[in-house]
Amino acid sequence: MRDNAGWMLVLAERVLNDAALAEDVVQEALISAINGLDRFEEKSSLKTWLHRITVNAALSKLRKQKRLAEHSIDEFLPEFDQYDCRIEQAWTHLASAQDMAEDAEARDHVMTCIRSLPDAFRLVLQLRDIEGYDTGETAKLLEISEANVKVRLHRARAALKKILEPVLRGEEHR
Amino acid sequence: MSEQQSTGLMRRLKGLMLKHMHSMITCREFEEFVMDYLDGSLPGAQKKRFEWHLRVCRECREYLAAYERTIDFGKTALGPADESVPADVPEDLVRAVLESRKA
């Protein structure tokens, strides 16, 4: 149990953006898993099954807290001029993910930027791009349409790009 | 003609070309196709237009590269939770779960 509870806490905290709530959620998820162990069909690994139970428990907590409202992130979206041409400052340098990974401060900054996105966008990005759920699975978990998952994911990525631009351009990030 | 006027004229010409030339799409239309292009689900004709646009538009080419790098940054900085360094599990959490089994 202890082996799984460790990564389940990381997962719940990522979904909830709240360490104290994450403990409650993991406790509920583990109790729910133990009570429902006879429903585990071994079609997937135990880890995959626990992953989904944790995400569902965390999302249920967010729903109770009504934190899934779709706040606007329009200010971070791409801009176009009157001729429908993109307004994009020239890129003379694009940092590599490897360079970022080796810089602890840059890595923390990326995590902080992801956490700063409104929940409705952050969750789609975390489930699809980071936890590896596909569009259909993400739609089911979040109880929204697949088309909405795609729209939110694109907006979340575009907004994150804008927020991360100083790091991506190799400029300072604090 | 000032540099600003010259840039404005170039953008206007580019916008007109992308809007009216056969097999071209505007930057705004390009934006609508980004997700499907990266997922590999963009139909053939649209994919061709998308890739033509990439060839002629510096702004969209650089935007797409930075957009893809942003996805890599997110994956690299966090990674799947079940592969991350596990958090310390509080004793009271373990106790509460164990007690629920006895109940």
Image (spheres, coloured by chain):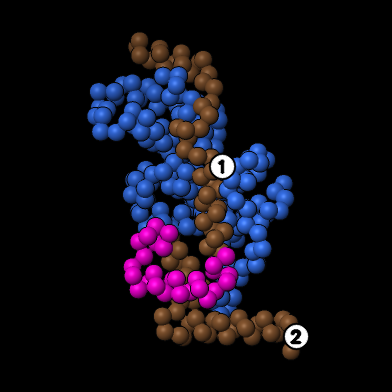
Chain colours: A blue, B brown
Amino acid type of the residue tagged 2 in the rendering: Ser
| Residue found at the very far right of the displayed protein | B2
Which residue is found at the position 41% from the left and 36% from the top? A55
Which residue carries the number 1 mark?
B77
Residue occupying image coordinates x 25% and y 23%: A38
Q: Which residues are magenta?
A: B36-62
Q: Picture quarter containing residue B65?
A: bottom right
Crowdedness near tag 2: few (<14), some (14–19) or many (≥20) residues, C-alpha within 10 Å: few
Q: Is residue A11 visible to us here?
A: no
Q: Residue A41's quadrant in the figure?
A: top left
Give residue A114's mark.
none
Using the image, name the chain to which the residue with label 2 belongs.
Answer: B
**In the image, is residue A125 above or below residue A17?**
below
- In the rendered image, residue A11, in percent from the top left (x then y), is placed at 48, 34
Give the side of residue B43 with respect to residue B20, left or right: left
Looking at this view, name the residue that lies furthest to the top: B102
Q: Amino acid at mark 1?
A: Ala
Q: Which residue is mark 2?
A: B2
Q: Is residue A32 visible?
A: yes
Left/right placement of residue A44 relative to residue A98 reads left
Residue A86 percent coordinates (x, y)? 57, 71
B58 relative position to A40: left or right: right
If you read the primary sequence from the N terminus, does the residue marked by circle 2 or circle 1 appear first?
Answer: 2
Relative height, residue B69 to residue A26 (above, below): below
Vertical relation: B101 (above or below) B55: above
Give percent across and percent down for residue B59: 58, 70
What secondary structure is the stretch in magenta mostly built from? helix
Residues indicated by labels 2 and 1 sit on the same polypeptide chain:
yes
* Residue that appears at 34% across and 11% down: B103
